[in-house]
Image (cartoon, coloured by chain):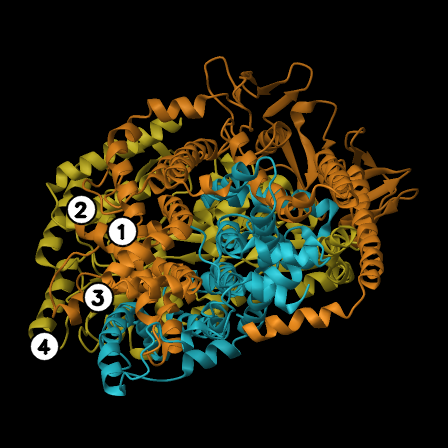
């Protein structure tokens, strides 16, 4: 019996040792990397894979100047907002993270970011960029890039920039009847809906999601899209759905491939596809989105920004790195080269590297007419119903006006429940 | 391993004397137990050092249990169970307990951290930069452990000096570099690296502009430039209230927020326990009650059908391939488990593409360009998620069935055959009942897993299609995907509510499963 | 303990893998008839294979397609080019080889440790009578039914706290991640093993004990060998489960160099919308290969009916 005990014990303890005791080697490696050297602090940055190399590059000169190490960790952009909100309070989150300007409200509501004092540099940024990181009068991030959709045009199928949506569709239909194209006009919708790509068309009917208070902030109590303008847009969606021009089966993937294959003269898309479109169609043009409802078709302009954690133990260093290094013209130009999104800093946008890039200039020109993506928490309640309703209208699942009203009522209830 | 090696092994072992083995084993036991104790004690000390009392207590108790158990000659089963149980306790039971705790809190957006963090955030937001006020490069000085800001003034040759306790005042003998004062006799000017070494003190330093607080205070956020701010929020620690610039007093409303008399709340709030309110809100929630029954029925159908079909498929394939006349069994088996070898999120994305009603392979190629709305019409969508889920689940059933068939004694089948039973008869009356006895618990557990198979639904249809665009529940929504939309789909993500719902679902599933085990009498046979 | 004791206990004496032994002893059946007998089996297998494989053929086709788009490549293998594989293995932005190695290491260690922990527990349940035995096994299974969708928050919190005491078990540690996986080692797998352990007749243990063997020796030298098929099944299930997990792994591991295949690929595909399809598909195809190889290797254990004992019934 003693033997039993012994052998068994050996096994169990081995397992436990393997479990707990394995700590030796890796523990040594972590301490030797110098992250916990007491002499200087180090900054932890969360970024997506595209921007990480540029941030590392800027970090090198920062480390040389200040002796503070910067560790850049690549994170899944889609989960970064919620991960940061849940991790920041434990003190384990990053000092700095990149994110969308439209996350600002959520961050402030949860007290996880600290205001960033841009000082007099603030004037150097595009207004729409500063607006998107401003919440209740305070600036919470340093914007570095703008992101918006525009219309790509294949000159072989449509030599001229269309003035209106109707004209674009006419050109497209002509190409389809001539057998040179398969789709008159491409816009990704997805069975789940895509109000982001559809927004410029909605705006051309004069139906923004929220009204704005005098200071420019979005007002969650005023759902501006719920008026007659919104219903006019809903009717338009139904009409386009019926005509088969807007299809809810059109996913991002299909739209991209169709345009690359020259099957349509037009596609609404963003800078993330520029490279592929230019490879396939060297003379591809980037135009403003034509108006369907008569007014300017303003897209959402999303901003990419750097935020500083409220729980950072290195506020001063983080602010220095963000404002003086990542906010520099050089950094913004480099970030543009990495991500293809026009810089938020005007001086960087005017830099030769950006200004001579026709696609960046074209997207910038469209961004001027854009509106910033709402950064208030109430926007979270809008997306779902909004997307589903657009899909239902395009699929002809009911009276467009009535569906639109229902969506509005449902969104209103959700926003009211929260306050 | 074959039977032959089995018959050879014991004699080899027998040559070794029991006494030798005992001595060696005992030495090993001592060494390992010492190591475990050393590790455990280290853990206790380290936990006490960082004031993690819960961890310290857990480690101390665990260590005592381990020592008593392994030094004792009794408690043999415990010796085998303890290693696994320790992991279970730390990593699984903790998750359940934590979820249980969170279910009684208001944890979620706006109530994300503790009260101190909330106060800090409110005060941080309540500090406003004065328009057109002083904004200047700052030098940071130190004397006798106190930090000072040195700033340029509008008086030629003079500079402004101040600390947390002394408001800014003019000093004469500052050393200038250009227009920027950089030093003062008797004070040490901090270098950039020294500034960063003391960054939290410097970041928190607020130098009053004058004796009058309304003039604001000077701060730096980067150690290089200073700006003037005024506070619009003031915290009174004794009364535990926050006063705004307009005189409104916000006090702790007991629900994790500072709120004014009029009910206006300051954001952010903090996490507090809220009793059963998450549970009662499940009952009172209108958007939950309406579709609840339909969703529940579909959840059961989805989980049961997945298990039954996947099991039928997996078992059939196991039977079909478990025959010596089938050549290439090994390869065929390996190909059949392939769906299991791909990550589920990838498979779901691929299926989504295949099922696209207009462009997907299934409609375009298999159905010759038909317009079948696989994911857009309610019943077809249910069929589709079921097929895809079966596709993902059957390799598991195939594996366990193959294993189970292999362990069945061939004599049973031979005996039945001798009695003249046909193939079908042998299967239905001999093999299947035997298999079910050994596999029923796996099927029940698979049922419970699919009951909560959030990912397979979410990745394919996100619960849709919706009969009505503003519905809270879609046609393929199962209980867990539906309630998560409720908890996270509004303006605020209500983590506490989601935890409460998880807990309820767990109770439902565990209850059904426990009952089923009883029904299948599997565990009754244990004793 | 002697060889005779084992043989006497396990009657009839176990032979080599059952697969080599036709169920019906019919030495005179001619090859032609055997082929006819087997042909319907091939037919069923073919149908099942089509169902099992056609989405996978799609992935392979996409991985070879220079455009790498999934939905519209209905013309399978219309363009074939290894560009995606080259990108996958050469682009330093996604250290695929590292991820691959990490996954194999984490999956392998987890599988072995899971089998060990589970087998110990199954042995206790099948060989000893103790208080709370029935309830204990049921509790193990029921605990695993807790919906894991929210577990990430608790696990994050737990690892943050553990990090202060045992840095190696904290966040961003592969060992820490393995520990989390081992939390699920006992559960339905224990039951699976318990069933097979119980199918080994107690007389084997008893005769070994009469011969002077301790319970540990019985466990390690006799029982574990007899239940090899189920150990192989559990090892495979655990390996695949670990390999495919990205929810917990993405919470625990943050440094790109430490990440697993599933996390790395998931983050890769979630960036820049649909740009990365081809590379992603290539990554998934390569990742599936070791699973298939391990299955082929373990198959001989899984399909070798070793014990003569019945499934407990």
Q: Is residue B358 above or below residue B190?
A: below
Q: Which mark is residue A192?
A: 1
Q: Nearer the viewer, residue B418 or A212?
A: B418
Give the chain letter for orange: B
Q: Which residue is mark 3?
A: B360
Question: What is the chain identity of the residue bearing mark 3?
Answer: B
Front position among marks 4 and 3:
3
Mark 4: few/some/many CA within 10 Å (<14, 14-19, 20+): few
Q: Position of residue A136 (x, y in %)?
A: 48, 34
Image marks 2 and 4: residues in contact by CB distance under 8 Å: no
The residue shown at (48%, 38%) is: A135
Q: Which residue is mark 2?
A: A392
C-alpha distance separating marks 4 and 1: 31 Å
Residue C146 in view here: no
Q: Position of residue C205 (x, y in %)?
A: 62, 56
Q: Report helix, strand or loop for mark 2.
A: helix
Q: Report helix, strand or loop for mark 3.
A: loop
Mark 1: few/some/many CA within 10 Å (<14, 14-19, 20+): many
Front position among marks 2 and 3:
3
Q: Position of residue B306 (x, y in %)?
A: 30, 51
Q: Is residue A193 above or below residue B501?
A: below
Residues behind callouts 4 and 3 on a single chain = no
Q: Between disc 2 and disc 4, whose residue precedes?
A: 4
Q: Which picture quadrant has residue A284?
A: bottom left
The residue shown at (81%, 65%) is: B17
Residues behind callouts 2 and 4 on a single chain = yes
Image marks 1 and 2: residues in contact by CB distance under 8 Å: no
Residue A329 lies left or right of residue A356; in this view the side is right
Q: Which residue is mark 4?
A: A179
Question: What is the chain identity of the residue bearing mark 2?
Answer: A
Front position among marks 4 and 1:
1
Give the chain letter for yellow: A
């Amino acid at each position: 019996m003693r033997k039993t005990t012994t052998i068994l014990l050996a096994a169990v303890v081995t397992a436990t040792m393997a479990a707990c005791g394995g700590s030796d080697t890796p523990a040594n490696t972590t301490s030797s990397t110098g992250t916990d050297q007491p002499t200087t602090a180090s900054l932890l940055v969360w970024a997506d894979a595209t921007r990480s190399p540029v941030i590392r590059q800027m970090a090198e000169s920062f480390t040389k100047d200040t002796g503070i190490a910067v560790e850049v960790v690549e994170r899944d952009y889609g989960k970064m907002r919620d991960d940061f909100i849940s991790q920041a309070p434990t003190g384990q989150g990053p000092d700095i993270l990149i994110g969308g300007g439209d996350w600002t409200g959520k961050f402030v509501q949860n007290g996880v970011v600290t205001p960033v004092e841009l000082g007099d540099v603030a004037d150097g940024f595009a207004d729409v960029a500063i607006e998107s990181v401003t919440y209740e009068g305070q600036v919470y991030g340093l914007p570095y890039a703008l992101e918006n959709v525009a219309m790509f045009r294949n000159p072989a199928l449509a030599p001229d920039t269309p003035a209106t949506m109707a004209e674009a569709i006419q050109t497209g239909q002509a190409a389809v009847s001539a057998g040179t194209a398969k789709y008159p006009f491409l816009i990704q919708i997805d069975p789940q809906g895509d109000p982001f790509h559809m927004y410029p068309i909605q705006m051309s009917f004069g139906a923004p999601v929220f009204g704005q208070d005098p200071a420019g902030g979005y007002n969650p109590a005023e759902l501006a899209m719920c008026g007659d303008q919104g219903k006019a847009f809903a009717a338009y969606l139904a009409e386009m759905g019926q005509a088969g021009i807007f299809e809810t089966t059109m996913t991002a993937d299909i739209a991209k491939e169709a345009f690359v294959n020259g099957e349509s003269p037009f596609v609404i898309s963003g800078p993330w596809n520029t490279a592929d479109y230019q490879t396939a169609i060297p003379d591809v043009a980037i135009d403003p989105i034509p108006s369907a409802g008569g007014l300017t078709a303003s897209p959402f302009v999303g901003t990419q920004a750097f935020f500083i954690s409220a729980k950072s133990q290195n506020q001063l260093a983080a602010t220095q790195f963000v404002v003086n290094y990542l906010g520099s013209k050089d950094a913004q130009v480099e970030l543009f080269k990495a991500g293809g999104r026009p810089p938020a800093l005007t001086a960087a946008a005017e830099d030769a590297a950006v200004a001579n890039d026709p696609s960046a200039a074209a997207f910038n020109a469209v961004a001027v007419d854009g509106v910033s993506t709402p950064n208030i928490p109430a926007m979270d309640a809008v997306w779902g119903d909004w997307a589903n309703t657009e899909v239902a209208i395009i699929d002809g699942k009911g009276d467009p006006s009535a569906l639109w009203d229902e969506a509005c009522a449902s969104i209103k209830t959700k926003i009211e429940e929260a306050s | 391993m074959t039977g032959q090696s089995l018959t050879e092994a014991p004699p080899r072992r027998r040559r070794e004397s029991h006494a030798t083995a005992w001595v060696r084993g005992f030495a090993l036991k001592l060494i390992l137990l010492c190591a475990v104790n050393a590790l455990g004690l280290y853990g206790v000390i380290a936990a006490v050092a960082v004031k993690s009392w819960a961890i310290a207590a857990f480690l101390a108790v665990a260590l005592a249990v381990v020592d008593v158990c392994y030094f004792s000659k009794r408690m043999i089963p415990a010796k085998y169970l303890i290693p696994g149980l320790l992991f279970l306790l730390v990593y699984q039971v903790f998750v359940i307990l934590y979820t249980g705790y969170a279910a009684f809190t208001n944890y979620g957006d706006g109530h994300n951290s503790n009260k101190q963090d909330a106060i800090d955030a409110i005060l941080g937001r309540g500090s406003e930069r004065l328009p057109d006020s002083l904004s200047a490069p700052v030098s940071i000085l130190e004397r006798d452990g106190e930090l000072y800001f040195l700033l340029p003034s509008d008086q030629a040759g003079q500079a402004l000096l101040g600390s947390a306790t002394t408001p800014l005042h003019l000093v004469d003998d500052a050393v200038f570099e250009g227009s920027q004062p950089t030093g003062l006799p008797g004070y040490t000017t901090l270098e950039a690296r020294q500034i960063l070494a003391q960054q939290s003190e410097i970041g928190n330093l607020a130098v009053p502009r004058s004796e009058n607080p309304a003039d604001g205070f000077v701060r730096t956020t980067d150690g290089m430039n200073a700006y003037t701010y005024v506070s619009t929020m003031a915290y009174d620690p004794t009364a535990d209230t926050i006063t705004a610039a307009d005189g409104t007093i916000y006090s702790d409303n007991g629900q994790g927020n500072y709120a004014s008399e009029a009910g206006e709340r300051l954001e952010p709030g903090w996490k507090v326990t809220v009793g059963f309110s998450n549970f009662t809100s499940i009952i009172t929630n209108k958007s939950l009650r309406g579709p609840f029954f339909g969703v529940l029925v579909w959840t059961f159908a989805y989980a049961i059908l997945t298990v039954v079909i996947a099991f039928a498929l997996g078992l059939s394939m196991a039977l079909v391939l478990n025959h010596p006349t089938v050549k290439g069994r090994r390869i065929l088996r390996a190909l059949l488990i392939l769906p299991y070898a791909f990550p589920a999120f990838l498979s779901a994305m691929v299926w989504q593409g295949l099922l696209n009603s207009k462009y997907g392979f299934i409609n375009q190629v298999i159905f010759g360009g038909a317009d079948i709305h696989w994911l857009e019409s309610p019943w077809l969508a249910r069929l589709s998620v079921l097929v895809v889920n079966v596709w993902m689940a059957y390799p598991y059933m195939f594996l366990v069935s193959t294993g189970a068939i292999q362990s069945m004694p061939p004599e049973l089948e031979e005996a039945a055959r001798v009695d003249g039973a046909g193939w079908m008869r042998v299967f239905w009356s001999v093999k299947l009942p035997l298999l079910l006895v050994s596999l029923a618990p796996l099927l029940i557990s698979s049922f419970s897993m699919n009951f909560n198979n959030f990912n397979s639904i979410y990745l394919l249809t996100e619960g849709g299609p919706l009969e009505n665009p503003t519905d809270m529940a879609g046609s393929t929504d199962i209980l867990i995907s539906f309630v998560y939309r409720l908890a996270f789909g509004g303006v605020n993500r209500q983590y506490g509510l989601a935890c409460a719902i998880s807990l309820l679902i767990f109770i439902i599933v565990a209850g059904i499963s426990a009952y089923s085990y009883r029904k299948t009498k599997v565990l009754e046979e244990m004793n | 303990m002697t060889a005779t004791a084992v043989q006497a206990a396990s009657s009839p004496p176990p032979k080599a893998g059952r697969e080599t032994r036709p169920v019906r002893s019919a030495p005179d059946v001619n090859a032609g008839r055997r082929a006819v007998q087997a042909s319907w089996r091939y037919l069923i297998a073919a149908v099942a294979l089509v169902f099992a494989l056609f989405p996978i053929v799609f992935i392979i086709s996409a991985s070879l397609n220079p455009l790498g788009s999934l939905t519209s490549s209905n013309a399978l293998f219309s363009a074939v080019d290894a560009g995606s594989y080259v990108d996958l293995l050469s682009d330093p932005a996604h250290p695929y080889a590292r991820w691959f190695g990490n996954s194999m290491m984490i999956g392998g260690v987890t599988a072995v440790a899971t089998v060990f922990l589970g087998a110990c527990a199954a042995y206790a349940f099948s060989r000893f009578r103790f208080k709370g035995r029935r309830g204990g096994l049921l509790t193990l299974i029921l605990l695993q039914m807790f919906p894991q969708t929210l577990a990430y928050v608790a696990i994050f919190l737990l690892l943050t706290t553990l990090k202060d005491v045992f840095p190696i078990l904290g966040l961003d540690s592969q060992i820490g991640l393995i520990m989390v996986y081992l939390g699920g080692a006992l559960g339905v797998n224990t039951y699976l093993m318990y069933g097979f352990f119980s199918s080994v007749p107690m007389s084997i243990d008893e005769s070994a004990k009469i011969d002077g063997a301790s319970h540990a020796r019985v466990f390690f030298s006799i029982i574990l060998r007899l239940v090899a098929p189920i150990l192989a099944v559990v090892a495979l299930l655990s390996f695949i489960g670990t390999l495919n997990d990205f929810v917990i792994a993405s919470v625990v591991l943050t440094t790109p160099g430490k990440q697993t295949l599933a996390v790395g690929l998931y983050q890769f595909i979630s960036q820049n919308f649909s740009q990365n399809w081809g590379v992603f598909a290539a990554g998934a195809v390569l990742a599936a290969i070791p699973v298939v190889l391990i299955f082929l290797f373990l198959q001989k254990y899984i399909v070798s009916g070793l014990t003569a004992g019945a499934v407990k019934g």
